[in-house]
Amino acid sequence: MRIAIVGLSIEIMLASPVATDTTAVQRYDAEDMLAGDVWMVRGMLARLAEEPDIEAVPLFWATALPGGPMTAAAYDEIKSETIRRLIEGGPFDGVLVANHGALEVAGMDEDADTDFVAAIRSAVGPQVPIGVSLDLHGDMTPGLLSAATVFSVLRTAPHRDDRETGWRAADQLVHVIRSGIRPKKAAVRIPILVPGETAVTALRPARELYGSLPEYDARSGILEANILVGFAWNDRPSTAVTAFAVSDGDAAAARNAAVDLAASIWAERSEFRLRMETAETAEGLRRALDAVERPVFVSDSGDNTTAGAAGDLTFVLQAALDDPQASDIVVAGITAPLTVERLIAAGVGAEVEIVLGAEHVSRPRTERRVIARVEACGETLELGGFQPYRSHEGAWACVRIGGVLATFHARAIGITTPHHFTAMGIQPTAHKAYVVKLGYLHPQLEDIAARHILLLSDGVSQLDMRRLDWSALPRPTYPLDTDFDWTPEDGLYGD
Ligand SMILES: [Zn+2]
């Protein structure tokens, strides 16, 4: 049995002004996929390795840090390379696709994960089973549901189960191939906007909803049931929460599971709220500086690069500088390519006048001149350890401005692990407070944080959905609209 592994795993924020172009995309060939401890792929490989008659054939996987719409050129290149390798390397008994969901391509009128998996379906023909793994912040569409055979979706946020999710996709696919069953699929589009920070799986209601999935999986005839929280910021027809189920051939079983799961999610719609510690920017910084615990991690949720924001905003850094008692605080991950170039040219130890806010692209400039002393800098960041989010880590500089350490970067970066700090010569736990451009903390930072404060800061990833402009999103959608009736049958599609 030969099973191909491919994927294009990118989360796109339509409102982000920085396009995801070919320079942002990272490509993994077979060797990199086998050796690289790659997100989701590592779980797929582990499952396929369990049986000696299965040949896993990793072909190609591409990813990028979340960002603005992918350019058509970058997408076409990855898609045609994927299809070419599938055709040249084939035939295959099955195909595994490690995607994210929420891929958007400039000028494409359709969800691009749908286009990608449909192209794979066309290439391999109607008989070859396809297993797709998705991040729970991806979206479902009728076309995507129909193009693939089985699905698995992450069940933790912050994400700690990519390995298990890849494993389950491969496990279902092997089961389908060996048994010859023809799975049936059903999905329910649930009209709720749920930004990821309100669906943390350690907290209710996501904890209970995701916790119920094993009961659905155990239902007679069900292969797997899953929940896609969706990518709430994108103004798209498919933006929603999705409950869906795949059965071993019993269409009614899939429908019933999807409908029941959707009903339980809908019943909890008003419970998707921020349940972590939150604060407006100045207040949150003050609390972090006053805290007894250390280190306190503070997230600049409005400019969350792991949701696709540009990381260009300096509002939080400027607020920290406004606080006369601010000291021993690190403000990390600001995208400012020209500033980085100047700081590197000046060199370590130099004092340079820089203009904070001069490189804002996603919000108005808020210029402020400061003197920055270059503490460290480099042309690239060498990161150790497992890296769930892979950006092209470009040039960077760490500077001291008064009592604040700040890091600037030539490209958007997701500071999601302690390795990011150590690679810049910053101790990841020794300082009082660390500001990162995230929403919830990613697992490796969550594990070292004594306390986390989420700032309700401005930016394209800000968390009040009612403050965004909506035109393509079907209405009514909760919480933009609150007074309407809905039943799961209204959103049901599939076999
Ligand atoms: Zn996610």
Image (spheres, rainbow, N blue to C red):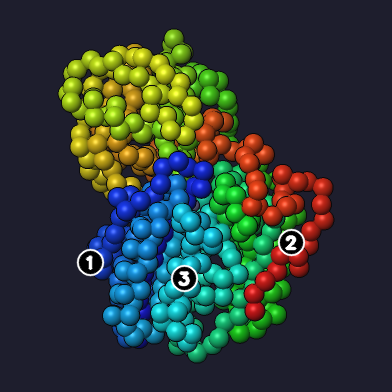
Give the distance between the C-alpha atoms of the residues marked 2 and 3, in whole angstroms. 28 Å
Label 2 Cα neighbours within 10 Å, binned few <14 / some 14-19 / many ≥20: some
Residue at disc 3, secondary structure = helix
Q: Residue at x 35, y 40 (%)?
A: 413
Q: From the viewer's side, name the closer residue of 310 and 420.
A: 310
Which callout, 3 or 1, points at the residue further toward the start of the chain?
Answer: 1
Give the distance between the C-alpha atoms of the residues marked 1 and 2, in whole angstroms. 44 Å
Label 1 Cα neighbours within 10 Å, binned few <14 / some 14-19 / many ≥20: few
The residue labelled by disc 3 is 117
Could you say where residue 274 lies in the image, as x and y percent from the top left? 62, 39
Residue farthest toward the bottom in the current orientation of the protein: 180
Mark 2 or mark 3, whichever is nearer to me:
3
Q: From the viewer's side, name the closer residue of 66 and 78.
A: 78
The residue labelled by disc 2 is 263
Could you say where residue 231 lies in the image, as x and y percent from the top left? 55, 52
Which quadrant holds residue 98? bottom left
Which callout, 2 or 3, points at the residue further toward the start of the chain?
Answer: 3
Could you say where residue 416 lies in the image, as x and y percent from the top left? 39, 42
Disc 3 within 8 angstroms of ligand 1 (CB): no
> In this rendering, is residue 22 above or below 333?
below
Tell whether label 3 touches label 2 (CB within 8 Å). Answer: no
